Amino acid sequence: MYSENFILNHLRFSLGDLVQTVNGNYGIVVGFGKHLKYPASDKTDYYHILIDGDVSCYLAFSLKKITKNT
């Protein structure tokens, strides 16, 4: 059986990117990987987002990249 993963460019983030969460909060991408609280039971990869001094885990589709207007 053939399997392939597709990631849309607008769902790809880099370390240091400013993002807005689905909740309306703004944060900085500080990592990518397993869930910080449930690494053994949750096999999904998340973006780790720093918001107000706390790091939370978000899926790519729940984030929007904020770009600087020039």
Image (spheres, rainbow, N blue to C red):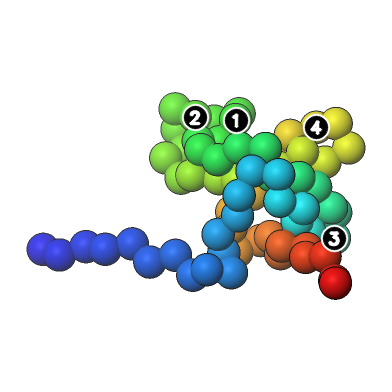
- Furthest-front residue in this view: 70
Q: Is residue 66 above or below residue 47?
A: below
Q: Earlier in the sequence, mark 2 or mark 3?
A: 3
| Residue 58 spot, x, y in % from top left | 64, 49
Residue marked by disc 2: 39
Residue marked by disc 1: 36
Q: CA distance from mark 4 to mark 3?
A: 16 Å
Image side of residue 27 versus residue 32, left or right? right
Nearer to me, 12 or 59: 12
Q: CA distance from mark 4 to mark 2?
A: 18 Å
What residue type is disc 2 on? Pro
Residue marked by disc 3: 24
| Residue 20 spot, x, y in % from top left | 79, 59
Q: Earlier in the sequence, mark 4 or mark 3?
A: 3
Q: Is residue 27 above or below residue 37?
A: below
Disc 2 element: loop
Residue marked by disc 4: 54
Nearer to me, 55 or 66: 66
Labelled pair 1, 2 in contact (Cβ < 8 Å): yes
Residue visible at 48% across and 44% down in the picture: 45
Q: Nearer the viewer, mark 4 or mark 2?
A: 4
Q: Within 10 angstroms of label 3, few (less than 14), some, or many (20 or more) residues?
A: few
Labelled pair 4, 2 in contact (Cβ < 8 Å): no
